Amino acid sequence: MAFLAAFIKRQFISYPPIPTTSFSGKTAIVTGSNVGLGLEACRYLVRLGASQIIIACRNTEKGEAAAKEIQASTSCPPDTLKVWQLDMSSYASVQAFADRAKAELPRLDILLLNAGLGTMKFRMAEGLEETINTNVVSLSLLAFLLHPKLHDTAVKHDSKTHLTATGSELYEVAKFAESKAPDGQIFASLSDQSKANMLDRYNTSKLLLIFVIKQIAALAPLESSKVIVNCVGPGFCQSELHRDYTNAALRFLIKILARPTEVGSRTLVYGAGAGPETHGQYLPDCKITATKGLTSGEAGTKLQNRVWVELKQKLEVIRPGVTWLA
Ligand SMILES: NC(=O)c1ccc[n+]([C@@H]2O[C@H](COP(=O)([O-])OP(=O)(O)OC[C@H]3O[C@@H](n4cnc5c(N)ncnc54)[C@H](OP(=O)(O)O)[C@@H]3O)[C@@H](O)[C@H]2O)c1
């Protein structure tokens, strides 16, 4: 009931503020920005002065169309936006993307980890259920691969840089039945089609994302890393996220309940420019908010540790040494 009341207030009454922070001279990577919240966040970053934005997407044709559209609406210099290929369902693609960013970008001020998948279809990618692979494991891999670049940029320019992930309020209602699996078996359990509850899958992936962000923030304290790590919550927004849902009634509900994409994107831009107090924090509608339910208290810490042991093992197999942070 409280969740419902808060939902209605957020969707119709209290919109997050229009971002005004300057991003002058900054370089940002925004994943999943050919459409939806990522595209609108890029438009804001351009308007607020960013000098280089990498639209990271799996379909570069769609990315080029997005870049053209942003360029036309903002009149920014055409080389402000670049489109780079990134397929989050492939570890080879994630690693190639990160290697390219390290080699070609003189600086990296913002890594906006926004690409995400919400589907009812059970598919596998890299030996894991695809939602978990995309929203959690590949996201973590990219975060760890590029954290050192964010650190180097912060040191070189005597600034703070940002690693911001797009979370979701739906983490609060995640059941995460797979957390009952024996130690070391959580990800295997999430990838067992015979037990998969796809209604809960997206919510669980966003709950795991909260753990990931808290974990990275703890591994890389701001004092030494100079990288602000946070997780935003945009509210329920118009976008392509619900493209799998063909049910007419559901599509109608989305249309009347969801916020404009631009409104949700304000929260992403806020996270990417937020202050040090947001390190390790969850920021629904631009406000630091204690996380709830399965992520809270001593039980939450224990569960986070169990998830981290497994995730770390996976990441270290993909790229040995990747989880070591400055
Ligand atoms: N809309 C909401 O109500 C809402 C609420 C809370 C949080 N979020 C989060 O906001 C983020 C952006 O979603 P959105 O609402 O803007 O949805 P969207 O319009 O569907 O955008 C999702 C983006 O992620 C990309 N993506 C998905 N799988 C990918 C993969 N394997 N490799 C590379 N890119 C991939 C999509 O690329 P393609 O176009 O190629 O598929 C697209 O660019 C997601 O993390 C989502 O979970 C959304």
Image (cartoon, rainbow, N blue to C red):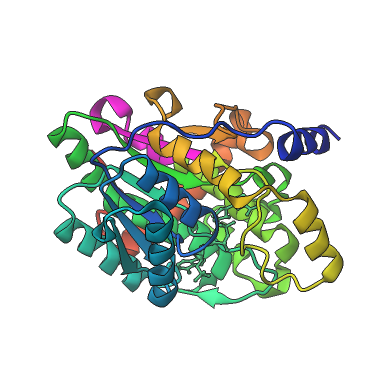
Q: Residue at x 70, y 69 (%)?
A: 120
Which percent across, then down, holds residue 123? Answer: 60, 76
211 sits to left or right of 313: right
User: In this view of the protein, can residue 277 be seen by the observer?
Assistant: yes
Which percent across, then down, holds residue 27? Answer: 26, 47
Pick the residue in front: 239 or 190.
239
Q: Residue at x 28, y 61 (%)?
A: 78
297 sits to left or right of 58: right
Q: Is residue 305 above or below residue 193?
A: above
State ligand 1's quadrant.
bottom right
Which percent across, then down, holds residue 88? Answer: 43, 67
Which percent across, then down, holds residue 150? Answer: 25, 43
What quarter of the picture does the C terminus occupy? top left
User: In this view of the protein, can residue 214 be seen by the observer?
Assistant: no
Q: Residue at x 45, y 40 (%)?
A: 269
- Magenta includes 29? no
Magenta segment boundaries in residue numbering: 215-231
Pick the residue in front: 291 or 180.
291
What quarter of the picture does the N terminus occupy? top right
Pick the residue in front: 61 or 212.
61
Number of numbered callouts drawn: 0
